[in-house]
Image (cartoon, rainbow, N blue to C red):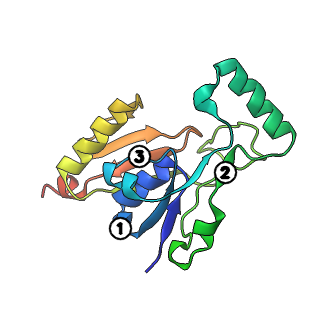
Amino acid sequence: MPRIISFLPSATEIAYTIGAGAELVGRSHECDFPPEVTALPVVSKPALPIGEMTQNEIDIAVASHLASGRSLYEVDEVLLREPHSDVRIGLLQHPENGGERFSEFRTGLDHVEFEVESPAALDAWRRRLDSLGIAWSGARAHIVTFRDPDNIQLEFYCAAMASGG
């Protein structure tokens, strides 16, 4: 059975959406949805005491960390090496991308779609996106479309609604 450690909240939510939530064995300090994920061990945390810093102090400390090549996060490597925490999913921002947004007009990924099991699950995702302030399109009742921070189109799709079931 695959075991997953998620370092991104969106990856955690996607794992649950595609039915792989039971395979999660660890999470980052930022992963808190769905609520049951908070019972999992936390495998990463900020390297800086950001809770005790002003925004200006955070900006200076982050710049200093990055300039010296230090990571902004601390990872529990013991948990990562433990045989029951085999990493299977990892979503990372590529360090060589200087902030260029995704475009469907270049070769590569067009969009990612995740099927949900029911109209109620689709409504739950609408409410979740609303709670996060993420704009979404409801042009079709059976699809919720939105964009990630890199402008990649993501969709939640309810086949039961599309087929009239």
Three-letter amino acid code at the position of disc 3: Asp
Q: Is residue 162 left or right of residue 133?
A: left
Measured from the top left, where is residue 7 in percent x and y? 55, 54
The one of 130 and 53 positioned closer to us in this rendering: 53
Q: List the residue tagged with mark 1.
A: 22
Res 14 visible? yes
Q: Are marks 3 and 2 in contact (CB under 8 Å)?
A: no
Mark 2 lies on a secondary structure that is strand
Q: Is residue 95 left or right of residue 91?
A: right
Name the N-terminal-most of marks 3 and 1. 1
Res 107 visible? no
Three-letter amino acid code at the position of disc 1: Ala
Q: Residues within 10 Å of mark 1 (few under 14, many from 20)?
A: few
Name the N-terminal-most of marks 3 and 2. 3
**Residue 74 — which label?**
2
Measured from the top left, where is residue 64 in percent x and y? 82, 33
Mark 3 lies on a secondary structure that is loop
Mark 1 lies on a secondary structure that is helix
Q: What is the spatial separation of the Cα atoms under label 2 and label 1, in whole angstroms?
A: 25 Å
Q: Are marks 3 and 1 in contact (CB under 8 Å)?
A: no
The one of 13 and 38 positioned closer to us in this rendering: 38
Tell me how many marks there are.
Answer: 3
Farthest right residue?
Answer: 68
Q: Residues within 10 Å of mark 3 (few under 14, many from 20)?
A: some
Q: List the residue tagged with mark 3.
A: 32
Closer to us: mark 2 or mark 1?
Answer: 2
Q: Quadrant of the N terminus?
A: bottom left
Name the N-terminal-most of marks 2 and 1. 1
Q: Are marks 2 and 1 in contact (CB under 8 Å)?
A: no
Three-letter amino acid code at the position of disc 2: Glu
